[in-house]
Amino acid sequence: MLLSVLPDTSTITNTKRPHDRAPGADGQGRGVLQSMTRLAIIGQREHPRGRLYDLRVGEQSVSALLTFHALQRMERWRLSDRQTLQALLFPEEVLRGHGGRFIAHRRIRARLIRAVYEYDGELPAVITVYSPLAKRYFRGGGRYEDRILA
């Protein structure tokens, strides 16, 4: 079961950035602001593999790791930690990748945030992330091989 949350404006930042828009009914990225998802970054700290984030989604607490490589790719693709974490926690679809990995997809207009992750024990760890054109990889949404917030 996917956790359904309501917007909480106390945890929202940069809500007017146009590239933070989640897709609407037309699939073209027009609709509710992606940052309206109730995601609060409680804290972050260094980890031997990257940066560990402590998050709160509604009443649920979760941690996620962004590896050093993922952090470099985020900089290259100009993706914020919030955008990457939202793609990880609130994907439109999750596909199975190679070697036990998963690929979370979240559209932003004509592009897609593609977060490749695996589990380090119970901890979801984003290995790499990039933002190709959605038409290349997006399969229509609604397919979930894995859900972090279940």
Image (cartoon, grey):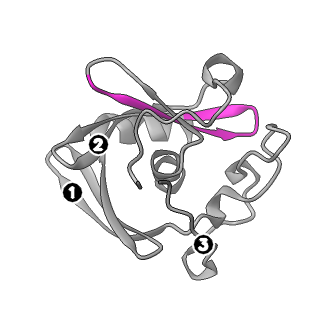
3D distance between C-alphas at marks 2 and 3: 24 Å
Vertical arrangement, residue 9 with respect to residue 56, above or below: below
Identify the residue under disc 2.
Answer: 125
Identify the residue under disc 1.
Answer: 46
Direction from residue 12 to residue 103 in the image, left or right: left
3D distance between C-alphas at marks 1 and 3: 24 Å
Vertical arrangement, residue 119 with respect to residue 40, above or below: above
3D distance between C-alphas at marks 2 and 1: 13 Å
Percent x, y for residue 92? 60, 41
Q: At label 1, which amino acid type do we have?
A: Glu
45 drawn magenta: no
Q: At label 3, which amino acid type do we have?
A: Ile
Q: Nearer the viewer, residue 126 or 99?
A: 99
Which secondary structure is most common in the magenta stretch?
strand
Which callout, 2 or 3, points at the residue further toward the start of the chain? Answer: 3
Q: At label 2, which amino acid type do we have?
A: Ala
Q: Nearer the viewer, residue 23 or 146?
A: 146
The kind of secondary structure element at disc 3 is loop
Residue at image position (42%, 76%) is 59
Instruction: Determine crowd level at label 2: few under 14, some 14-19, many 20+ residues with C-alpha closer than 10 A.
Output: many
Instruction: Determine crowd level at label 1: few under 14, some 14-19, many 20+ residues with C-alpha closer than 10 A.
Output: few
Residue at image position (64%, 73%) is 7
Direction from residue 65 to residue 139 in the image, left or right: right
Residue at image position (63%, 79%) is 9
In this picture, which residue range is highlighted in magenta?
100-113
**Residue 12, numbered circle:** 3
Percent x, y for residue 120? 18, 42
Percent x, y for residue 78? 56, 42
Residue at the extreme bottom = 10
